[in-house]
Image (tube, grey):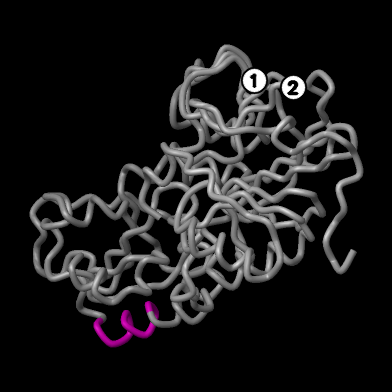
Amino acid sequence: MAGRRAYLASMQPADLLQPSAAGLYAPQGGFHIDPTRAVDVALVTHGHADHARPGHGTVVATAETLKIMEVRYGAGFAGATQVAEPGATLRFGSVSVTFAPAGHVLGSAQILVEADGTRIVASGDYKRLPDPTCAPFVPIPCDVFITEATFGLPVFHHADPADEIAKLLASLARSSERAHMVGAYSLGKAQRVIRLLRDAGYDAPIYIHGALEKLCALYEELGVALGPLSPATVAKGAKGDFAGAVVIAPPGALQDRWARRFPDPVICHASGWMRIRQRAKQSGVELPLILSDHADWDELTRTIRDVGAKEVWVTHGREEALVRWCELNGIRAKPLHLVGYEDEPE
């Protein structure tokens, strides 16, 4: 089969899983994956708000994702919930479903959907680089691989995370009189930056914006040690306040009045988009940190090869370039043009 799985049954992939107005839908199983509007049964890959929305009848997700949704939306975010243990098979009508780690953020999962010998994997968002805050991505052999393409252009090559943290620490040593304010998304990226700093030997208190407090506490509760954290509160920004400190906040907070209370900070941003220098410059970022929780171009193409799929569907992101790469490599591919994703900063 030259590395590609053969279809073993008469069932066509589109009969098993298909796009709908609410997102990917399994008609034989009666469920949606990461639906963008309220549905009866939602299988949720991870806790980011463009994939995990409140108001569904039942949400099926990993235990960590369910806890994240509760923190973000409150205890009544769904009519009912069901824990999907990674590796365990669940049945929905004639369809079997298995969750497996995606390496994106804590609790993130791919979802294997299979019936009558046809296997489709919906990746959700994922990355292949090591991350001390979540379980690593596991390639799953399948007939059809449904992938994101947030960074689906050859220009995107993410840096070694340890090298980016070393850049931050070197800047702290050079500019010890200035606070370093790091823009990092509140779920996943912020906790990863904190853990990477700890792994690099930084043991001083790290100051966090109020929007990060509940999620950082949940990460600690779920076994991700983040070390000493303190609220990043400052009244007037007196000279010397937070000198030499690391302050982590959502990227949007770096542009509002809260950030202006800190005197002469070094503005940093941890994101895969920092590969584009002009984007960093336009955002007023002095120290760009190329840290992403999504797969870069090489990770995307490597993963497609690893899973051995005969066909690839691309859900969102830079779809056309990845579809073209598949075609050039003898793999059938199509963009799904799903809307409602990537609403949150990377």
* Quadrant of residue 248 within the rendered picture: bottom left
Residue at the spot 64% in from the left edge and 29% down from the top edge? 43
Q: Nearer the viewer, residue 134 or 311?
A: 311
Check residue 81 in the rendering and tell me which mark sits there, or answer none.
1
Residue at the spot 46% in from the left edge and 47% down from the top edge? 187
Q: Is residue 202 above or below residue 118?
A: below
Q: Is residue 29 above or below residue 203?
A: above
User: Residue 60 appears at what percent x and percent y?
Assistant: 66, 27
Residue at the spot 21% in from the left edge and 57% down from the top edge? 254
Label 1 vs 2, first from the N-terminus: 2
The amino acid pointed to by label 1 is: Thr
Q: Residues within 10 Å of mark 1 (few under 14, many from 20)?
A: some
Q: Is residue 135 left or right of residue 56?
A: right
Q: Nearer the viewer, residue 205 or 101?
A: 101
Q: Is residue 137 left or right of residue 47?
A: right
Whether residue 102 is visible, yes or no, is yes
User: Residue 264 appears at what percent x and percent y?
Assistant: 13, 71
Q: CA distance from mark 1 to mark 2?
A: 17 Å
Residue at the spot 62% in from the left edge and 14% down from the top edge? 80
Quadrant placement of the N terminus: bottom right
User: Residue 75 appears at what percent x and percent y?
Assistant: 51, 19
The amino acid pointed to by label 2 is: Gly
Q: Nearer the viewer, mark 1 or mark 2?
A: 2
Check residue 290 in the rendering and tell me which mark sits there, or answer none.
none
Numbered range of the magenta stretch: 168-175
User: Residue 87 appears at what percent x and percent y?
Assistant: 82, 42
Q: Nearer the viewer, residue 50 or 117?
A: 117
Mark 2 sits on what residue?
29
Q: Is residue 132 above or below residue 100?
A: below
